[in-house]
Image: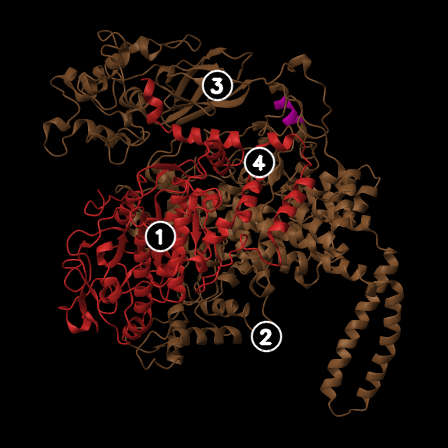
Chain colours: A brown, B red
Amino acid sequence: MRTVVVTLLGALALTAPLIAKDAPLRTPEQRFADLAKAEEPSFRRHVVPLLSRAGCNGRECHGSFQGRGGFRLSLFGYDFEKDLEQMTVKDDGDEKQVRISREHPEKSLLLTKGTNEEPHKGKERFKKGSWEYNTVLKWIKGGAKSDVEATGEFDRLEVSPKEIVFKKVGDKVQLKVLAYWKDGTIEDVTQLTRFRSNDDSVSTISLSGVAEAKDKGDTHIVAFYDNGVHPIPVVLPVSDKVGPKYPRLATTSKVDEHVVGKLAKLGIVPSELCTDTEFLRRVSLDVTGTLPTPDQITSFLSDKSPNKRAAKIDELLKTPAYAAWWATKLSDFLGNNPRLLRGAMGNGGNYGASFSRQWYDWMYHRIAKNEPYDQMMAGIILATGRTRPDQTYEEYAKEMSSYFRDEKPANFAERPNMPYFWHRTNLQKAEEKALAFSHSFLGVRIECAQCHKHPFDQWTQTDFKQFQAFFEGVSSAGSKAGSVKPMAKVAKGEKAAVDDKGEKVKPPVTYASLLKEIKDAVPADPKGGNNQKALQTEFDRRVKAGEPAPWQEVYAMVVAPGKGGDKNAKTKGGFDGRVLTPKVLGGEAVMLNEYPDPRAPLMEWLRSPKNPYFAKAWVNRVWASYFHRGLVEPADDMNLANPPVNGDLMDYLADGFVKHCYDMAWLHKEILTSATYQRSWKPNETNKNDEKNFSRFVIRRLPAELVVDGITQATLASDKIGKYRDEIETRAIGPNANAGSAGKGGKGGGSNYSLNIFGKPVRETNCDCERTTDPTLLQTLFTRNDPELLNTLEQARGSAYVEEVRRLTSNESTPEKLKDSIAKLAPAVKKLEEQLAQNPPKKEKLEAQLKDMKERLTKAEASLELAQKRGPVSQEEFINQVFLRTVSRPPTATEIEKAKADFAAAKSPAEGVRELLWAMLNTREFMVNH
Amino acid sequence: MSTHITCDGVARRDFLRVGALTGVGLSLSDYFALSSQGAVSETKGKAAIFVRLGGGPSHMDTFDLKPDAPETHRGEFKPIKTNADGVMISEHLPKLAKCADKFAILRGVSHTLAAHELGTRYMNTGNRPLPSLNYPHYGAVVAKEIRGTEYLPSFVAVPSLGENATGYLGVEYGPFETGGSPQPGKALEVRGLALKNGVTIEDVDRRQNLVARYDNAFGEFGKDDKLLAGMDQFGQKAYAMMRSSKARDAFDTGKESESITKLFGTDQFSQSCLLATRLIESGVRFTSVSLGGWDTHSDNFNTLKNKNLPTLDAGLSGLFAALAAKGLLETTCVFVTGEFGRTPKVNARGGRDHYPRAMFCLLGGGGIQGGQVVGESDAKGEGPKDKAITPDDVAATFYRALGIDSRKEYQTRTGRPIMIVRNGTPLKELVA
């Protein structure tokens, strides 16, 4: 049997008894209350946690970067050396600045301020003579020494009970916290632990660790000690339907099993399944970012097959719109921002939008063929500018130009890798790369640890710096030096060198040499200016011709610790002069020089089955996209104090995703086919307040692109609407809008204005929260009365439904009239053609006439076909169409009656349709996914 | 130890809870809170006009002339006296010289970001840009801090502000962009408010009823659900705005009296300044106007002399005069800034290049002590003479004038506590 030793420190350690494993551990109060008999307290294990729990190193107290009253502690602790220094060393010779008096320990400011004997802005933190007071006093009497080396590494916390299920409001449970150290020490640190409730309205937690039920619901209580962070779930059922009273629910999928498992604990009964129309609208919007068309709705409703929902999911996952929408989302997560993408000829090149588009396309093609997620990410993470190990810079520069050349441009999407993530101009310094990397690929925010111990996670500043070390050698400027094939050295001043055979060797082409070529090719500005425009023109000329041009390249080199790869790393790479070994977050140290590229071990770590973040980050983002909140929420903020709302479900999906070799389609299907995804929004008594356990569908506003595209689609003519989903180029979820050129020349979908006010992210910061679906007043004004919307109603893409109705209902559009005009037009066309065949004078004029006439003929024929197919046009059909186009369901009988009345008041059927379309686009039913 | 909570990261939890309860963020709860207090129709209060001089105006040729600097530096323009004792500005700003008592000139304002975008961010937020965080534009903060009116947006940009003015505050505090600049004597047709495409007031009323007839798919739940209820509220407010003749009138500079319009030129900038005063009078809290073309890498002196300075002179002097005439100067703080100054040494093309080490800003009205120069650049205008004024200090001063505590803390959406202005201290020469 293993035995453990309690606090082996100082002389007292020798007398500390060995305690059997199961014997209760003594509490700090028991150990330190009696000054005479007390053990020797440890600085790290007892004093610092005590001060921390007393709030001394909090943000508004001495943890503030300015300190308080000249006394500054490291925020949330963990910089033991500095903290000790603040207490024990005079910093300006002023005796009063020292907070510990070795001669008169009782007079130490640390104590007299803490007890408010000396006036203390932070009031009394502990009572004189209390065990807390005595702990600090005893430590001072013992010499106020640091023992960080001696205590060794902290291992973990154990909190009991592991979970609390309350029965009623007011119930209380005392928590107990044990600290495990790597040296085998185990201590009861309940009284030294900081506690926090993630939701005070559900359960509070007292300073001494008593949890108290406040209201129905669930949350977590988190314990903090040293760098240990440990959450435990807390539940107070919301109804009496618990245990045997919980209804028996058949669960057909693993996802449902886990979700219902949690709901049963909470006494929440999930909502019924949604209707077919609700499902079709929801899944089309969520998977493809596109509303279902009237035809799709009608055929789905008439489909009698029992597994039509699963079949629909399969079908949608194969559409271009699926790849487009998820390329858009990935672009969000990875920061694909055209304004921050540079890399052509210094900062001068105007290639940001092109790079952004290429980035999007590259991902689009991989999503479309369902390339495994890890493989696609590796293509981004490990990307270098050069696509082959033996490629020279010159070949690279030519290859880059080949994607932009006029003649048969090469396809960027076929590149084996995609280097633009590293081109981001807000990713220049190693620390910026570390932050963006952890946000994009790990779903972890470590920025806190840049400056202080992370308040909600284990990360310390050292962890951050060690992680940052991976990125010191990753560069995206100029060309990689010393990487060309061996050449005779070019001595300074010499134009060219000579090889062993005495022949002249051209110096290797580099970024700088190409830049110089461009400069040399452009005549100097007579005014002495920097000639930016002319240089750009020459650059563009080379690119269009497919010649090598000075493109910057991404490359990575292993940098000796402390030396620094780029100029920023040189000053900021070191950490207090210590040499740091790169270390993956929460994992192992890595010997970088065993790798050619410092990112290689990172990628290995991401792919290792034990990686705690990589798969979960994606699973969580996909889940968040379908349920409006992640299993961890916010979806990009995985930290120890913010555990998943359903841990088992997270593990199941993440493990499954890895086991299925990062198959994205598998993940989508696993979620979408579950009953959990297909729940109705209609609440019942038990789940009306639940918005986080997935017991019903939580209604949310459509994302910006879907609003904008949805409005366009709803207003398009019947012959355009069917193709709209697949016409990615013109969509707000398409490559043009993603590259920031929405609306320009009609290329992208919608305008930047509308996308902006509906919350499309600009992709400038490392936060998924940039995308917002909050409603605002401006959005309402937009749908009510903005010219963009009003114009779309009448002339969507030059082919509006309203216009179609106008044609169909005009006197010119009866089948008889149409037949008449065809009968007249057809011979006229023939006649003109004959005339033209004889090559008459004024040929252009006749050709124009012919073209016009042919167009009219085609239109008339199409209208006739439509008219015959539809039969007589009915008001009811128009009303039906408007509902299907906007809210994706047929109108109810009442709605038809209302609409008929409104049509009767309208000047024409077309006007009636326009007004009804306007009204439906302004309903909340259109604006939300439900 | 009961207060330990206030000292220890609790703010994040509050934030999460608010988020969890409302489900839709702060915009709605703010709005509900305000409307339930009946406070959303208050029209009097502090306000601001932000005049952005895009491109980076040369400090040496406008408000910080150096007649004694060497020829290579001092430029062509002479300083002239103003109506404020001892304050001299460029000879090409004669109208502003006559109302220099209404604003203060800040010299030796200094930072290090020489790129347009970064400099603009810094000067428009009062916080040095960070890659990990987007700070909100002054206008977004003002829109959040100062209650607006029922029928007008709080933050109006004439004609626009570009992307992401709201930073971590979120789109609800974003600018209402007019999309165009006003023409003399004509109503500016602003998107969403103007009745265009043949829409009449009757149509607005009829359509409001029409939506109500069809927007009831969610039944009672539409009232319980925060998102749905909030969207409905915005529908009511949008209707009120579209229907309000006051709102449309606010954008109609044709309705302005002649005594006011004659204070301005007929160019876009002047007319935008006129509109700004009118909007503030109607209850808008923050209006931004802009005058570009200051990026004078070549031919600096002709450009300034013939174009930029006369335009600025007319518009800005009109702005101060109109605010004074309307009795709004005491409550309206005017803030004029570019993104940086320009190189003191004239380049070979007769131009000046980007130069953030020394620039100027103007602050006036809203209780700012005008008629004085604060701060000083060195003999050649190459940097601050003694202590630099930072953009953060300028921001803190501006907020102080508006009665906003620049050290107030917000929560970013990631739960990080962050002060409105992280490092600035108000300049005590300017604000009490």
Q: Position of residue A111 (x, y in %)?
A: 20, 18
Do callouts 1 and 3 mark residues in contact (Cβ within 8 Å)?
no
Q: Residue B227 — which label?
A: 4
Q: Position of residue A225 (x, y in %)?
A: 37, 23
| Residue occupied by mark 2 | A407
Q: Residue at x 27, y 59 (%)?
A: B356
Find out whether the residues at labels 4 and 2 contact each other: C-beta distance under 8 Å: no
Give B206 or B140, whichever is nearer the viewer: B206
Q: Is residue A469 visible?
A: yes
How busy is the neighbourhood of tag 1: few (under 14 within 10 Å), some, or many (20 plus)?
Answer: many
Q: Is residue B412 above or below residue A326?
A: above
Q: Are marks 2 and 1 in contact (CB under 8 Å)?
A: no
Start and end of the magenta stretch?
A257-263
A452 lies above or below A551: above
Q: Which mark is residue A203?
A: 3
* Secondary structure of the residue carrying numbered label 3: strand
Q: Nearer the viewer, mark 2 or mark 3?
A: 3
Q: Main secondary structure of the magenta part?
A: helix
> What amino acid is labelled 1 in the image?
Ile
Three-letter residue code for mark 4? Leu
Mark 4 vs 1, N-terminal side: 1
CA gap, disc 2 to disc 1? Answer: 52 Å
Farthest bottom residue in view:
A841
Q: Where's the C terminus of chain A, which quadrant?
A: top right
C-alpha span from label 4 to label 1 = 33 Å
Q: Quadrant of residue A46?
A: top left
Badge 4 crowding class, 10 Å Cα cut-off, few under 14, some 14 to 19, many 20 or more, is many
Residue A506 visible in the snapshot: no
Q: Which amino acid, mark 2?
A: Glu
Where does the N terminus of chain A fall, quadrant-wise?
A: top left
Determine whether the residue tagged by mark 1 lies in a helix, strand or loop: strand
